[in-house]
Image (cartoon, grey):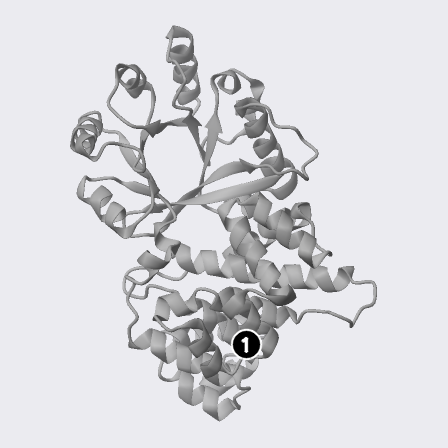
């Protein structure tokens, strides 16, 4: 079983929360027959194995609930202040369910109606008992959006646009007054190309090139001084790191030595994705996506190396795996062809092959990381089989560890 996550964003693209999703494939031991069982497994994995910190961090979680599940004891395992319960679109709101929702709302639970396509009589029955209306942008008739939005506003409900596939859909949803947004629009190539690629990102790329070439301290000082935001971050972190020893760092050179070039390189790699104009890196979902992908790549490389019978033969450099995860979207952000960027950074052949053609062991790991994000279990299975040392179950566990690491960073 995989624990899938899909981010939910605010109007300024800051991360609001995650919808937790059940993912199954042929290698699973559990046979999932209905929504009740699927959600039960998600809840069990979230609270019993991974924990809230790894699953959703400090953000809000969204869980799909069937009618039967709403009347079960499972609902009482969920802290109401941390989760929104999504009621499936085919659920009938009769007097019994209305009474149950009222009881749970008094206990602090919030409800969302899933996959709304039109303002139907069934929705009218449900509206007084829910807090969030999720409109399916992929299948909803666009001519009905104005009416749906107007009625949601009249009822003072939070509006969530789901299945947003393009930047145009995102802008349309914002124009209709939607509050929250769900979909892959921020991570799709056509949208990434719309993000600003200003001088700050170019400066960070130059710094990344310097770091990849094992630049000495004076060269790093010179490059860092061209990025005041990063320089301040490094100074703050360095001082926090040595504060227990009663020291204070006052120069960039001291900060570089205290933090270390490896950690600086990782910050630089992630900050290339940050939207410095409106979001901090901590709130930018794209930075979190790339950070989690890179950390998952690193963890898979470490697990692969540990699983080899003859250690040293066929191992994968974990630092190269991390960089592959980071650089996998950089060409889209900076509008530079992958092979050109690889040449600029003078990447080693395994890393270049992984990025340009997704070949080799590193390339198979990159396939796994990307497929895991999308919940494509068949692709995860195939790439795991090609590598031989990884399993889908192990990847799922490493994925949660990667999420927790990104949030800590």
Q: Position of residue 174 (x, y in %)?
A: 22, 44
Residue 282 seen in this snapshot: no
**Could you tell me which residue is drawn at 23 percent across and 42 percent down?**
173
**Could you tell me which residue is drawn at 48 percent across and 92 percent down?**
218
**Could you tell me which residue is drawn at 17 percent across and 26 percent down?**
154
Q: Position of residue 130 (x, y in %)?
A: 34, 23
SS class of the residue under badge 1? helix
* Residue farthest to the top, as pictured: 95
In this picture, residue 180 sits left or right of residue 288? left
Can you tell which quarter of the image residue 144 is in? top left
Residue 257 seen in this snapshot: yes
Determine whether 125 is above or below 364 in the image.
Answer: above
Q: Nearer the viewer, residue 239 or 338?
A: 338
Determine whether 254 is above or below 144 in the image.
Answer: below
Can you tell which quarter of the image residue 352 is in? bottom right
In this picture, residue 296 sits left or right of residue 103? right
Determine whether 73 is above or below 315 in the image.
Answer: above
In this picture, residue 223 sits left or right of residue 31? left
In this picture, residue 374 sits left or right of residue 150? right
Question: Which residue in the structure is indicated by mark 1?
Answer: 259
Please state the total of marks drawn on the protein image. Answer: 1
Can you tell which quarter of the image residue 276 is in? bottom left
At label 1, counting other C-alpha atoms closer than 10 Å, the crowd grade (few under 14, some 14-19, many 20 or more) is some
Q: Nearer the viewer, residue 159 or 227?
A: 159
Looking at the rendered image, the quarter that the N terminus falls into is top right
**Could you tell me which residue is drawn at 56 percent across and 71 percent down?**
353
Q: Position of residue 358 (x, y in %)?
A: 55, 64
Q: Position of residue 254 (x, y in %)?
A: 51, 85
């Amino acid at each position: 079983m995989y624990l899938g996550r899909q981010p939910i964003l605010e109007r300024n693209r800051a991360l609001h929360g995650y919808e937790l999703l059940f993912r199954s494939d042929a290698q699973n031991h559990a046979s999932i027959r209905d929504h009740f069982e699927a959600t039960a497994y998600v809840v069990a994995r979230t609270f019993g194995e991974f924990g809230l910190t790894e699953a959703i961090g400090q953000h809000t979680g969204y869980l799909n609930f069937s009618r039967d599940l709403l009347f079960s004891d499972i609902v009482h395992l969920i802290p109401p202040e941390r989760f929104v319960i999504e009621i499936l679109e085919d659920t009938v709101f009769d007097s019994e369910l209305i009474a149950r929702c009222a009881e749970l709302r008094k206990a602090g639970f919030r409800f969302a109606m899933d996959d709304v396509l039109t303002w139907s009589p069934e929705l009218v029955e449900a509206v007084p008992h829910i807090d969030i209306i999720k409109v399916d942008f992929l299948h909803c008739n666009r001519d009905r959006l104005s009416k749906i939005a107007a009625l949601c506003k009249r009822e003072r409900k939070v509006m969530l646009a789901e299945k947003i596939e393009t930047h145009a859909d995102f802008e349309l949803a914002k124009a209709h007054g939607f509050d929250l947004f769900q979909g892959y629009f921020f991570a799709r190539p056509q949208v990434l190309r719309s993000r600003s690629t200003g001088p700050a990102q170019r400066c960070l790329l130059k710094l990344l090139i310097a770091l990849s070439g094992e630049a000495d301290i004076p060269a790093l000082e010179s490059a860092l001084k061209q990025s005041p935001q990063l320089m301040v971050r490094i100074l703050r972190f360095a001082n926090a790191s040595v504060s227990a020893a009663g020291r204070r760092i006052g120069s960039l050179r001291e900060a570089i030595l205290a933090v270390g070039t490896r950690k600086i390189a990782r910050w630089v790699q992630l900050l290339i994705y940050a939207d410095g104009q409106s979001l901090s890196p901590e709130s930018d979902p794209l930075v979190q996506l790339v950070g989690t992908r890179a950390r998952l790549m690193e963890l898979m490389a470490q697990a692969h190396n540990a699983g080899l019978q003859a250690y040293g033969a066929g191992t994968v450099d974990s630092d190269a795996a991390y960089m592959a995860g980071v650089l996998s979207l950089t060409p889209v952000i900076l509008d530079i062809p992958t092979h050109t960027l690889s040449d600029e950074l003078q990447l080693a052949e395994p890393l270049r092959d992984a990025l340009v053609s997704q070949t080799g062991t590193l390339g198979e790991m990159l396939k796994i990381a990307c497929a895991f994000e999308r919940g494509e279990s068949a692709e995860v299975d195939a790439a795991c089989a090609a590598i031989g040392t990884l399993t889908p179950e192990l990847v799922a566990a490493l994925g949660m560890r990667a999420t927790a690491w990104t949030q800590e960073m």
